[in-house]
Amino acid sequence: MKKRFYITTPIYYPSAKLHIGHAYCTTLTDIFARSKRERGYECYFLTGADEHGLKIEKNAEAAGVTPQAFVDNIVEGFYKLWDLLKISNDDFIRTTQTRHTETVQKIFTRMLNKGDIYLGKYEGWYCRYCESFWTDTQAGPDKVCPDCGRPVQKAEEEAYFFKTSKYVDSLMKFFDENPKFLIPESRKNEMINTFIKPGLDDLCVSRTSFSWGIPVVENPKHVVYVWLDALTNYITALGYDSKDDSLFKKYWEDEETEIIHILGADITRFHAIYWPMFLESLGIRKPDREFVHGLLMMKDSKMSKSKGNVVDPYPLVEKYGVDAVRYYLAREVNFGSDGSFSPEQFVERINVDLANAYGNLLNRTVSMINKYFQGTIPAYQGQKTDFDGSLESMIELTIDSYEKAMDDLKITEALTYVNELVNRANKYIDETTPWVLAKDSEKVDELASVMNHLSRALFVASRLYHPVLVTASDKAFTQLGLSEEKALYENVHDKHLLDNLTVNKGEPLFPRLDPVVEVPFINELMSGNK
Ligand code: ME8
């Protein structure tokens, strides 16, 4: 395993407010970054905003403001959301920042001088009214403008292109030599069969029909077009080809860094095909892994404002708290598969896993330690019964399976191991029946052992939940009497960690949600009425 990590999310378009799909990707990336840092690895985490392009230019015009003012306003909302969700990114790149625009211009020049970019003609469907070019797919079967609905005409404009043909063979070789590059693996065949085998067109990398973009130095009526501008953020943010490139050296060039991009299935093609080609053209290393997550549907159909099924994460977090929303996103939809958001499942997930299983286990354990041992956790005395032995092995097994799953970005699976440990610990209470042991003075050691084992199971579960439940886990540590230092991840295998600590009973971590009240509330949120 490499010793440090560089992990990124896509940079989202500030053409409108972010929705729960963006929050899903950023939260899951954050969970991975936090879990690595907690386990003692360096991890640099980047997210940002992709601020150029026709759509933003048009939205700004409609709003009667400059494109810069338009994106400034929306990006303010990105910051607020990531703050609310406690996203621990180390940097936030905006493609309008000089550190990005200057380097993109240098990259363009280098590719042009190398002959990898050439001037040609872009053919598309043109709407005279909107002054916009559209692709075949965007114009649809009726060949109308997707913005205004008027008929569009075939037209040409001068544009620069990136020579993909030059890099196809080495891309295929790269895929072969790096079977773990694209995850899930099925995505690789999809890329090859859908895009490469039928023949890949050269990629248009400049436009003249709008101006909100980075000017091409050699020919300033052109602006750099979308994917060359967007993808290079992953290196411009690290200071590639700039005065201070220390981060680039550390987090990109050094082979001891594992570079991981997280992205949604909608943009796999750009990351899996064009990005490695751009990097090869620049003569720099390709990422180690690209993890493609599925898309969230809302109530089984695509999110759309007109259907009233867009989930705005802001009010959801405000109402239910950061931990509940982070947990739901990480646990409900298997990271890598498509899934859906549903208010009923949201409420049930929080109630079953967090309120009933985890929160209740903590509550019961702390109450029993107060009742039977005046608030002091009895010291570890080995395994008094087979039940103790079986819980101890389960704890070790859970840590091991959790770490393996997390390393493979199987975040949902990692959480199920913690859920199983919590359920096992609840069952252990039923098996050991502490209330019966408490009535027999000869069983006091056994009872003490039960309390110690339960506390340790709770510590380990809380530690493993911590990258997700960023506030509740800390509260659990406090209730178990663990100082910040004692609660460190490096102590997960220490059987004596909980010895003689004083518990502090607190509020329930997750109050039960009443579905009769909460489901209609979330439905209202989704219809935009709240
Ligand atoms: O594509 N479910 O930006 P974007 C889950 N700027 N995730 C979703 C989602 C959904 N329904 N909808 C969006 C762009 N996402 C470019 C990226 S990167 C160099 C440039 C997430 O604002 C998912 O991660 O359209 C998807 O890939 C990304 O947001 C697209 O965000």
Image (spheres, helix red, strand yellow):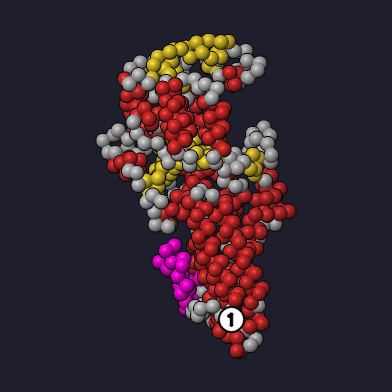
Query: In the image, residue 56 lies at what x, y percent?
Result: 50, 27
Q: Is residue 449 above or below residue 300?
A: below
Can the viewer see residue 426?
yes
Q: Is residue 375 above or below residue 441?
A: above
The residue shown at (52%, 41%) is: 183
Magenta: predominant secondary structure element?
A: loop
Q: In which quarter of the view is residue 336 placed?
A: top right
Query: In the image, residue 85 lies at what x, y percent?
Result: 51, 49
Tell whether 371 sits left or right of 118: right
* Camera-nearest residue between 490 and 186: 186
* Image: magenta residue range: 479-502
Can the viewer see residue 261?
no
Q: Is residue 61 above or below residue 287?
A: above
Tell whether 500 sits left or right of 427: left
Query: In the image, residue 396 lies at what x, y percent?
Result: 51, 65
Q: Amino acid at mark 1?
A: Leu
Q: Magenta stretch: residue 224 in it?
A: no
* Camera-nearest residue between 293 and 310: 293
Q: Which residue is mark 1?
A: 447
- Whether the residue under disc 1 has CB within 8 Å of ligand 1: no
Q: In which quarter of the view is residue 241 placed?
A: top left
The residue shown at (53%, 76%) is: 452
The residue shown at (63%, 88%) is: 440
Q: Magenta stretch: residue 493 in it?
A: yes
Of helix, strand and loop, which one carries label 1? helix
